Image (tube, rainbow, N blue to C red):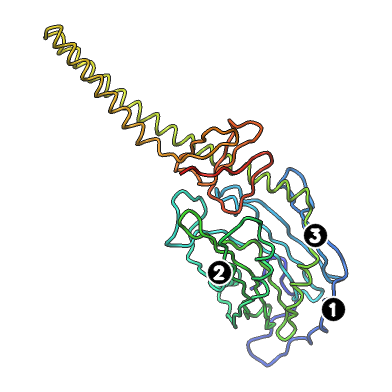
Amino acid sequence: SGDPGLQASLPVAPAQGGAALPPMPPPLDTRLGQQVSIMDQAGFGQPVVAATVAIPAGWQSGGGITWNTGTSCFSNQMQVNWSAIGPDSLTAIAIMSGFNWQVQGSQNPENPCPIAPFRSTQEFLAATAQKLRPGVRILGYEKRPDLEQKAAAAQQQGMQGVRHDGGQMMIGYEQDGVPMEEALIAVTGFTMNAGGVMGSVGTFYAVRAPKGRLDLGLTQRVADTMQPNPQYMAAVRQRGMDGIGHWARERSQAISDWHNREMAMINARGNADRHAIRMRGNQETASIYNAIAANTSATTDRMHATTMSGVGEYDRYAGVDGTEVQNSIHNGPRVFQNTSDPSQAISTSDPYVNAPGGYQELEPQP
């Protein structure tokens, strides 16, 4: 089986009778010769060029970028599914979305990203290969230290403790009776996050061809020509920060609603207690009534103070204007405050988020 839209037109060899397939077309020239655009058709209300890339002359490109707004894990919302196919309808290169996940067994319940068992790029690619082409044969796997070094050199300034794991998996299958080889190439970054481990594959490459004709260097040659659109990338970053802010506000509102419900229950119990006290006071002397009322009031105050301390559950951060910013422990541990309007602050658990424009990340106070 193959990718939709990339099926070969060659007839399948019959199971009996010994009839042969037509001769294979000559090998393709995979030198780069034309520039094409990778498009985001609707992510920002209208088609936008996300990046340009060079592909071999005479090849056809398709696909692009879509958005999955149904997930709260904002790193997984942007979906890349772009490919270029050669004139033989068999040889192709693809750039596909990676995946961000919490490594199973170390997950943080406050993190909205999914939980998966992958602890290496090899495990991720093996699962991806079966998802792309069920029943595929895995022919081999090798580490790619060169890709790990490039990823480490390109990582965002200030990102510490990231372990990069690069690798290449070879798979085999038949497409319309033609034996095929395909390489899946990816780099995973593993990061400690609030006591858990996050795995992240940004995008990964696939290149395929009839057996014996696979050009492994094509992926790197294409990748080296990619030029992202700076305005598009800025809009993507802003969309991510807006999404994180929206999620943080929803979390904060949920905590506030829970707190209000708890306080309403406490107040209801307090009203019942005070009513009972008033009933008892009607039957006692004024001095005894006053003593009971004073004692009950002090007890209620202590209960209230204890309850507020328990339900507060917040960490303290040094604000940009010298004040203290309180952030619920149920929010993400990274807090950003608006330098021009300190009343505006957001929090997130995403270790890859940069501070949005006008915001400064705050340091926690001991």
* Nearest-to-viewer mark from 1 and 3: 3
Distance (Cα) linking label 1 and label 2? 31 Å
x and y percentages locating residue 273 in the rendered image? 22, 20
Q: Mark 1 or mark 2, which has the lower sequence index?
A: 1
Few, some or many residues within 10 Å of mark 2 (<14, 14–19, 20+): many
Q: Is residue 49 shown above or below 357?
A: below
Name the foreground residue: 246 vs 16: 246
Q: Quadrant of the C terminus?
A: top left
Residue displayed at 55% across by 62% down: 161
Q: Earlier in the sequence, mark 3 or mark 2?
A: 2
Q: Secondary structure at mark 1?
A: loop
Is 167 on the left-hand or right-hand side of 253?
Answer: right
- The kind of residue tagged 3 is Gln
Horizontal side of 265 relative to 111 (left or right) equals left
Return the residue found at the far left. 284
- At 15% from the left and 8% from the top, the residue drawn is 287
Q: Residues within 10 Å of mark 3 (few under 14, many from 20)?
A: some
Work out whether residue 59 or residue 168 is closer to the camera in this orientation and state it: 168
In the rendered image, the vertical position of residue 299 relative to residue 253, given as above or below: above
Amino acid carrying label 1: it is: Asp
Residue located beneath label 2 in the image = 124
- Pick whichever, 182 or 296, lies toward us: 296
Indicate the position of residue 149 as horizontal and vertical percent values. 66, 70
- Work out which quarter of the rendered image holds the N terminus and state it: bottom right
